[in-house]
Image: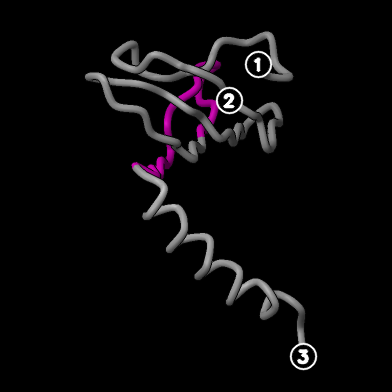
Amino acid sequence: MSDSSEKLPISEIYKVIDYITIFKSSKWWEAIVVSEAYGKRSIGVYLWVKKNDVWKRKNKFSVRNIDEWNKLKNAVDQLAPKLSSK
């Protein structure tokens, strides 16, 4: 499932199907999560920040279907080469 033994700080509304931690430090945690709620699955990109020893969600971005993913992927593929300076 994941590379962390710590439970994801995600609402109990969501059933976590699987996830991958992208980055985790003592203050920040970023993960890609496949979850299910109300009979529908989605992929969420989560960012949490630890305040007073408690993880709080800072940001969440969801992908709800394959068509939406393909549009996002194509846009990122087009823009990714611009990450290189000059």
Decide: few, some or many residues near mark 2? Use Cα within 10 Å; few <14, some 14-19, many ≥20.
some
Can you identify the residue that label 2 sits on? 19
Decide which of 21, 35 is in the foreground and name it.
Answer: 35
Asked if the magenta segment contains residue 56, the reply would be: yes
> Of helix, strand and loop, which one carries label 2?
strand
| Residue under the point 51% across and 32% down | 48
Q: Quadrant of residue 26?
A: top right
Which residue is the site of mark 3?
86
Q: Position of residue 2 (x, y in %)?
A: 67, 19
> What residue would you read off at disc 1?
1
Gap in angstroms between the C-alphas marked 2 and 1: 6 Å
Q: Mark 2 vs mark 1: which is more N-terminal?
A: 1
Query: Residue at 59% across / 36% down in the picture?
Result: 30
Magenta segment: 48-64
Q: Residue at x 42, y 20 (%)?
A: 10
Of 25 and 75, nearer the camera is 75
Residue 7 shown left or right of residue 57 in the figure: right
CA separation in Å, label 3 and label 2 = 35 Å
Q: Going from the N terminus, do you reach mark 3 or mark 1 first?
A: 1
Badge 1 crowding class, 10 Å Cα cut-off, few under 14, some 14 to 19, many 20 or more, is few
Most distant residue in the left direction: 38
Q: Amino acid at mark 2?
A: Tyr
* Mark 3 surroundings within 10 Å by alpha-carbon count, few (fewer than 14), some (14 through 19), many (20 or more): few
Magenta stretch containing residue 15, yes or no?
no
Q: CA distance from mark 3 to mark 1?
A: 39 Å
The residue mark sitting in front, 3 or 2, is: 2
Labels 3 & 1 near each other (Cβ < 8 A): no
Q: Is residue 45 left or right of residue 63?
A: right
x and y, in percent, of residue 78 in the image: 58, 76
Please report whichever mark, 3 or 2, sits nearer to the chain's N-terminal start: 2
Amino acid type at image mark 3: Lys
